[in-house]
Amino acid sequence: MTPAVQRQATGDAHDHLRSPASHASSPLVGMRVVITRAEDRADHMAERLRSLGAEPIIYPTIAFVPPEDRGPLDAALQRLTEGGYDWLALTSATAVKVLAETGLRVAEHKNLKLAAVGSATAATCTDLLGVAPAVVPGKFVAEALAEALGDIREQRVLLANADIARPTLEERLRATGALVDRVVAYRTVLATDSDIDLPALLAAGQIGAITFTSGSTVRYFVQRIGPAALADARRTIIACIGPITAEAARELGLPPTIIATPSTEEGLIETLQIYVKQQNEDSE
């Protein structure tokens, strides 16, 4: 790792590490940026940060494992193959991957339509399930998907997501009269397999920003680092991918410094660049 540079003398809660080269190229040059998402989802973000001169610190706080009981998922997929659903609603790329691993090819089911939250989930649907979603809302939250689906009363919807997913989408669809089956496609658990002593790096002031891509990454991050390190984490840039993640961060004692626009991985990195650039200019 590159040596940590001195913090601003102001000691502001949003101070961050900077390199003398940051004004000549990317504002992120020399900054250590923590990636808290699952390890198998971190590589693209890490590569993008490296291309901008940052030093990604992959510190997964969550991992994905199969449901404790696959029976409900298998039964729902059997109903799907028999034409039992009008819609398949997916709220994460991980759920798409789980269904793809079962051999599901949506193109083989002519009357089944896909709905997805987020551009990454939609792209994964196209890549792994063979069909682009018919509905992808402009805002990447469950509330927006429910609104975008409109009047689907009496239509049958299979909602496959994480065990800890918010109930919002299911509740709103039911409120419109849709017939919803919600099944657990995977479980989100605490990741513990990292040899990085992040609390020590935070205490030494050697972390510039921490990125969060879901409420679960925030919750398990707080659990992993422990209460003693929370104050040190607050002295970094807390970067959240969207409003739901930001709300979780606030509730857990990590007020967000920035919220990505748009709510995508690339939007998160771009918003971070804009913020750091502005901070650098303000300090001159």
Image (tube, rainbow, N blue to C red):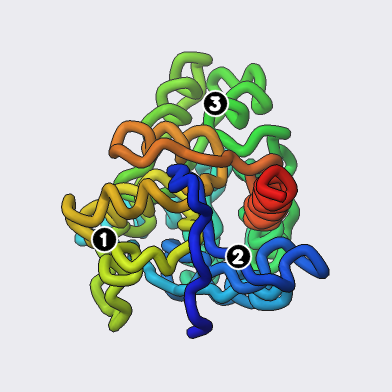
Position above or below: 264 against 249: below
Position above or below: 136 against 74: above
Give the mark nearest the N terminus, 3 or 1. Answer: 3
Distance of mark 2 from mark 1, alpha carbons? 34 Å
User: What amino acid is at disc 3?
Assistant: Glu
Mark 1 surroundings within 10 Å by alpha-carbon count, few (fewer than 14), some (14 through 19), many (20 or more)? some
Choose mark 3 or mark 2, whichever is in front: 2
User: Residue tagged by mark 2?
Assistant: 18
User: What amino acid is at disc 2?
Assistant: Arg
* Residue 198 x %, y %: 31, 69
Which residue is pictured at 46% across the width and 57% down the height? 210
User: Residue tagged by mark 1?
Assistant: 189
* Residue 172 x %, y %: 47, 21
* Residue 233 x %, y %: 35, 53
Q: Quadrant of residue 215?
A: top left
User: Residue tagged by mark 3?
Assistant: 143
